[in-house]
Amino acid sequence: MDRKKLYPWYFTSGALIIFFLLCFLPGIIGILYSFTDWNNFTDKINFVGLKNYLEIFKGKPEYRMYIWNTVVFTTVTTILKTVVGLALALLLTQKVIKLKNFHRMIIFSPQVISYLVVGLVFKSMLHPQTGFLNNFLKSIGLDFLAMNWLTDLTTVFPTVMSVDTWKGMGYIMVVIIAGLMSISPDYYEAANIDGANFWQKFRLITLPLLKPIIINVTILNVTYGFRVFDMIYSLTNGGPGNATGVINTAVYKEFSKGNYAMGTTLSSILFFILLFLLYFIVKSMENKEVQM
Amino acid sequence: MNSLKKSIGNIVINIITIIISLIILIPILVLFLNSFKTQGESNKMSLSLPSKWMFENYKTVIEQGKLVSSFFNSLLYATVSVSIIIVVVSAAAFVIARNRKGINNFIYYFIISGIAIPINNVALMKVMQSLHLVNTRIGIILIYAAINIPLSLFLSYGFISTIPREIDEAAVIDGCGPIKLFIKIILPLLKPITSTLFVLNFMAVWNDFIMPLYYLNNSQKWPMTLAVYNFFGAFENSWNLVSADIIVTLLPVLFVFILGQKYIVGGVAAGSVKG
């Protein structure tokens, strides 16, 4: 049977054309334009070499702040979501918990809510005067804990990262539960006969067998973290000042100012960072295959 | 003694679980209660019941927030782009899964790299301008299709690989060509993955906020997310109305979530456990 005839190449063309035109092509054009002074004020576009990149790495410190914030956000939320997600998954697979599926559904549910809406919900909940959290803390006599969650320079970034974890932890939990279910109970039975305690079973059976899933979850969280936009835009819009600005909020800021070249340069830097990470992800997957 | 200790332990971890669920539920519950209060009462957000249930808050919000037209915009963008995704992705995944050699292998990796690689929104503007798609409904629909194709292809490919090839051979012997084979034989078998793709992509499009922010500046074409964001800006001091607005926006997604829960959780788990 002729495979080429039965499975014609043009079946792939729809997906390929749409993806090529609206995802790949902008990426390439964007890199080309990052070497120009493209903006909204003149029609003339001049080649300026590496000027935009030098501006970001040597010029105004706010640009390096955006990149630094993105890295901090990615690292902290990845660790938080993985640890909390794993803890929740372990908790919600215990036999003694009542209404397990109901709790799983509740904890997963923020995942289906728009980042924008989550942002607005917490913007109102965390309002220093009218918000629920401060009212609640004051009503139980913990006034000293009531803070300006989203306007104080020292608390704003941890607050944003916590809200992001609130939204994302259920998703990670569901993925890890699926992984836990696929571990054969025989291992635990054997360990019980040998008299292993909870921590020994966790460290010697659960963690090693969950390793591939933890790697996947980490990849998911890292690629999300670098691209984060909605959450921050709706909670703080990068403020106060530039305290919570990340690469993608900066891209939008430059875009709305008409400063297209700078926007596309920042976007291209993000592109290179993720391409670099993708290279390592693929490499680590190849190694896994070789080992097996 | 030991069994007493154990049952206390059981109660404690059940209470911990309930507290965690409450941390998720309370914000939504507070907003729900708040959405029925008067403006004065809603200024102090709490879990107390409204002294007078103001159902007319919802009427005000739906009228002033342009929620009806933006609801239909969202519905249009989500259903059309998801249909496009399902058609092009199933066809592509079918051919790639059956014959993953040479160019097909390259196409597969090329497209799924889009799961991780970010979109350059500034340059996408340039492409959209040259295709005359800026500020059009079809433009935003095509963007949604494009950004969701990579993950959908990945999931669909994994599923089609589990359908035995003998089915194709039997169909060919019965005289099917490639198009007939795909439409009559393969597509009906794809029902489970099609449902997953539908629910996952529908919610992704429904919840998106970035693309209209960049590419739609005409408020008549705004989807719900953008309408809510603007409402929030305009009524920032009327927390009761803002709460009602948020609740109205939440309802459709919660509805889809409750109906399609099986597919969402299944899709989420399949996508990351296999990958």
Image (tube, coloured by chain):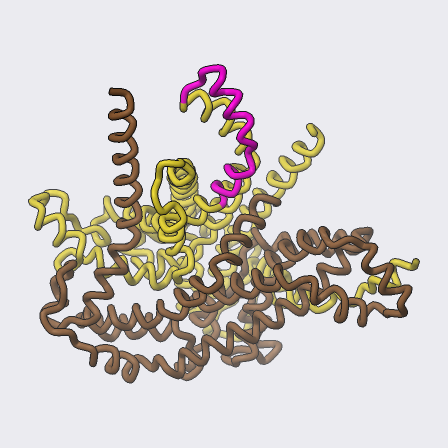
Q: Residue at x 83, y 64 (%)?
A: A8
The residue range painted magenta reads A175-197
**Residue occupying the far top of the picture:** A194
Say above or below: B6 vs B15.
above
**Relative image position of residue A283 (x, y in whole percent):** 65, 37
**What shade does chain A have?**
yellow
**Residue B163 falls in image quadrant:** bottom right
Q: Residue at x 38, y 45 (%)?
A: A100
**Relative image position of residue B164 (x, y in whole percent):** 78, 53
Tell me if I can see residue A29 in this picture.
no
**Relative image position of residue B159 (x, y in whole percent):** 67, 54
Tell me if I can see residue A157 in this picture.
yes
**Residue A13 falls in image quadrant:** bottom right
Please state if A119 lies on the left or on the right of B195 as rendered: left
Please state if B15 lies on the left or on the right of B138 as rendered: left
Q: Is residue B172 magenta?
A: no
Q: Main secondary structure of the magenta part?
A: helix
